[in-house]
Amino acid sequence: MALPTAAPIPARLMALADVFDALTSDRCYRAALPVDKALGMIREQRGKDFDPQVHDSFFDVLDEILELREIYKDE
């Protein structure tokens, strides 16, 4: 997949957040991946599927993301 440079920044942010959520959540066709594995997969896509600036910003606030993920986890 080509880097979506024409997409607005909010769309790029949501795309990365959606991938993280999809990888770390149970799906009917597979179990959730461990967070470390999902983050490794995301790291590999910097500059490919994910805008480097958005990617770096995601990792800058990763602690807060993980905290919010814990607060709002599905029961």
Image (tube, rainbow, N blue to C red):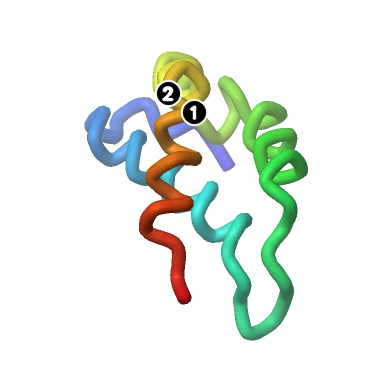
CB-based contact (under 8 Å), mark 2 and mark 1: yes
Residue type at mark 1 is: Asp
Horizontally, is 11 left or right of 19 in the view? left
Reading the image, the residue beneath label 2 is 61
In this view, the residue in front, 12 or 61, is 61
SS for dot 2: loop
Up the image or down, 75 lies above or below 22; here it is below
Name the mark on residue 36.
Answer: none
Which kind of residue does numbered mark 2 sit on? Val
> Which quadrant of the view contains residue 47?
top right
Q: Name the residue: 47% across, 52% down.
A: 70
Mark 2: few/some/many CA within 10 Å (<14, 14-19, 20+): few
- Image point (42%, 23%), residue name: 61
Residue for badge 1: 63
Mark closer to the observer (2, 1)? 1
Residue 53 falls left or right of residue 23:
left
Kindly identify the residue that appears in the image at 58 percent across and 42 percent down.
1
Residue 32, horizontal then vertical, whole percent: 68, 64
Residue 17 to residue 75: above or below: above
